[in-house]
């Protein structure tokens, strides 16, 4: 999670066609940073998994779906999502959610 002007960037590692959907915490990324691990039951077919990822994030973090967009890795498991709004407030909201659900 990184605040940027006008929002925040969130790195993800996505598992499509999972048996159960949800956010499974943070995993180490190849460059040593962290990525949010997200599983969705939708297949990676015509953007279905990407739509499911955005819907899952919006619901979990109480965000408007229109404030989220995949800006990198749309066709890959590693994705970058831009969340529009106050970047620092978004970061606090996500960190709080992670503490409450994955500590």
Image (spheres, rainbow, N blue to C red):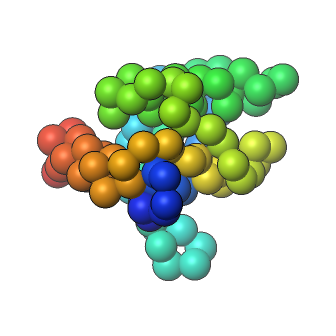
Identify the residue at image location x=49%, y=52%: 6
Image vertical order of residue 13 relative to residue 22, above or below: below
Tell me residue 33's x, y (percent): 47, 73
Identify the residue at image location x=33%, y=33%: 61
Quadrant in the rendering for residue 14: top right
Residue 21 in view, yes or no: no
Tell me residue 42's x, y (percent): 65, 21
Identify the residue at image location x=28%, y=49%: 89
Residue 6 in view, yes or no: yes
**3 or 39, which lies in front?**
3
Quarter the N terminus occupies: bottom left
Tell me residue 9's x, y (percent): 52, 56
Q: Is residue 103 left or right of residue 77?
A: left
Image vertical order of residue 50 relative to residue 33, above or below: above
Q: Is residue 80 left or right of residue 36?
A: right
The residue positioned farthest toward the bottom in the image shown: 32
Quadrant in the rendering for residue 87: bottom left
**87 or 12, which lies in front?**
87
């Amino acid at each position: 999670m990184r605040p940027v002007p006008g929002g925040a960037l969130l790195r993800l590692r996505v598992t499509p066609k999972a048996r159960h959907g949800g956010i499974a915490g943070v995993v180490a990324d190849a460059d040593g940073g962290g990525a949010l691990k997200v599983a969705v039951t939708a297949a990676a077919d015509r953007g279905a998994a990407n739509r499911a990822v955005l819907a899952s994030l919006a619901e979990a973090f109480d965000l408007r779906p229109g404030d989220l967009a995949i800006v990198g890795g749309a066709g890959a498991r590693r994705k970058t999502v831009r969340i529009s709004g106050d970047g620092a407030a978004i970061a606090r909201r996500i960190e709080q959610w992670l503490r409450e659900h994955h500590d």
